[in-house]
Image (spheres, coloured by chain):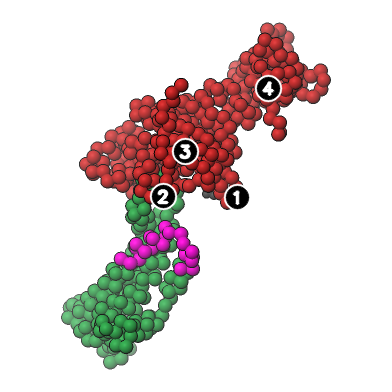
Amino acid sequence: MTEIWQGLIRAVQLLVSFDAEVVEIAARTLRIAGTSSLLAAIISLPLGTLIHFRQFRGKGALINIVQTLYFLPTVIVGLFVFVLLSRAGPLGELGILFTPQAMVVGQMVLITPIMLGMTISALSGVRKELLETATSLGASGSQLGLLVLREARYAVLAALLLGFGRALSELGVAMMVGGNIDGYTRMMTGAIWLATQRGDLELALALGIILLFLALVISIVLNRLQQRRPQ
Amino acid sequence: MSRPPSMIRITALTHRYGDREVLKGLDLSISRGETFALIGPTGAGKTTLLRIIDLLEMPSSGEICFDDRPVPGSGKQRLQMRRRMSLIHQKPQLFDSSVYDNVACGLRWRGNKETETVRKVGSILETVGLDRYEGRDARTLSGGEAQRVALARALVLEPEVLLLDEPTANLDPVSTSRIERLIRSIARQRSTTMIMATHDMSQGQYLADRIGVLIDGRLVQTGNSTEVFRSPRSEEVAGFVGMENIIEGKVVASAEGIATVKTGSDPDGTTIQAVSDQPVGREVHACVRPEDITLAPATHRSSARNSFRGTVTGVASSGPLSRVEVDCGFALVALVTRLSTEELGLEEGAAVVADFKATAVHVIERSAHR
Ligand SMILES: Nc1ncnc2c1ncn2[C@@H]1O[C@H](COP(=O)(O)OP(=O)(O)OP(=O)(O)O)[C@@H](O)[C@H]1O
Ligand SMILES: [Mg+2]
């Protein structure tokens, strides 16, 4: 028991002294998860708006599939992207397996369904009469798209945050396509896993505290956003 | 007679929701600068017609010409036509932003310069009496304020055609008259073409050059307000424009423009004299407005063409007026002031004489299919 206490105390010391290794891993994690979230958002917002406005056959089925992919296990995504990027795979020529780029690709596969699906349901919360009013006031198709995103901004932001949270906290993809390489592709989750294996409790706990803290911040912001939903 | 060019012309317009026909073969032409009121009971299809005119919805069949050009089914030209009109919805829908942004959005969508937008928005907010509201969150406004923002948002675009869907429904009398005055002054100053839906007959009469009565998806009568108000073409219109007394009968004599209408089926039933040239033998409705009927004590000797002895069967007060129901062989409703109600001692069972002039009676041919 004392061992755990001492580990915790030393972990806090690592945090307050801005230990170089801790800071480096945390920064890399934020950078990679941030990049994949940004790219996933760039895909999800316009695509979600388009799907929301267009009527086509199989729209309901498509939305169902996207929603099912929310629960995609990270190791399945890891496996899929690994096969895709491995030397013999269809994208093997890129030679990016076990690089941060590969991790970004993998995380995008993981979180784009969440961002896309939740964006679509956020937009469907905007009243039809409101969009009709905008049309009547002379909005063109793309202006209408921007308006609906603006009207649903809190719910849309919540969708993006949830995706970011998942990218931050996943382990499977980072390990399988990133390789958990020290100083290169090691993320917080991977570092915690390895440090725990090695018995380096203080590093594991320090990183764990940061991860928990980030989760807390995201959840508070999400809660706030949910309360700001109009009426 | 040369008519001014038509701004909106609708031909054989029909609209269905599922297999329900909501609009049934409408023909309507509205001239540039005209103020047209569309009146009709709830569910008649007023909103649907306005939405179709605003090009928000495609009619199931029929043609619409805007400024003498047929409206295309889609594309840029349709957007450009739509940008020359604006529709104010029955329930104002404000965007989740400031009052300023709500009013400015239409100008921004049209690519106006922001400096010009600032000026126009400021001046229109002043017109609707909402200066100093620019920064307010639009979602926190009262119903009347929201309605005025919706009006400002449409007016700031200086549309050639302004479509108003019950602009004063859900408003108190003060806000109502304020908005009515505003609409009236805009119609005058800017010579905007206006089409407004309302189920308030008097509002239509006050604001419009011409009135169209829409009942159950059909435009049953169009004309100026005197025509519609005084000479409704059918029993339905008569009822809708406030001719509460609609008495079934048959013309039994006709001389010098005065028709004698026998009421009821009994051979020596009461007769009503009316100014009408309906021929003898025709089945008709004789319609009389409650406010055109005067009541007097039973001892009164009258000079009116129509004078009937009867018994009061009910009295209901609404504001300064009382509605008095009288049975004089047929049922009549008369509108009298509260004061005369008291003076005449009008209460259930009282004997009275009901008088009305032959000119107060409007005779309509009874449609065969009823
Ligand atoms: N989207 C829709 N789908 C199905 N039916 C509809 C739709 N919109 C309107 N209707 C029906 O069409 C009919 C006409 O509706 P509309 O809103 O045009 O009436 P209105 O004259 O404006 O009535 P009110 O005075 O109550 O506003 C109504 O019976 C309504 O139920
Ligand atoms: Mg309506």
Do the residues indicated by labels 3 and 1 lie within the same chain of the protein? yes
| Residue tagged 4 | B286
Chain letter of mark 2 equals B
Type of amino acid under label 4 = Ala
Measured Cα–Cα span from mark 1 to mark 4: 37 Å
Q: Residue furthest right?
A: B267
Q: Which chain is green?
A: A
Residue B74, label in figure: 2
Label 2 in the same subunit as label 1 = yes
> CA separation, marks 2 and 1?
24 Å
Residue that carries the numbered disc 3 in the rendered image: B165
Look at the numbered disc 3 and give the secondary structure of its residue: strand
> In the rendered image, which quarter is residue A27 located in?
bottom left
Magenta range: A42-62
- Label 2 neighbourhood size at 10 Å, few (<14), some (14-19), many (20+)? few
Which chain is disc 3 placed on? B
Residue B61, compared with residue A90, is above or below; it is: above
Residue at point 44%, 25% (across, down): B3
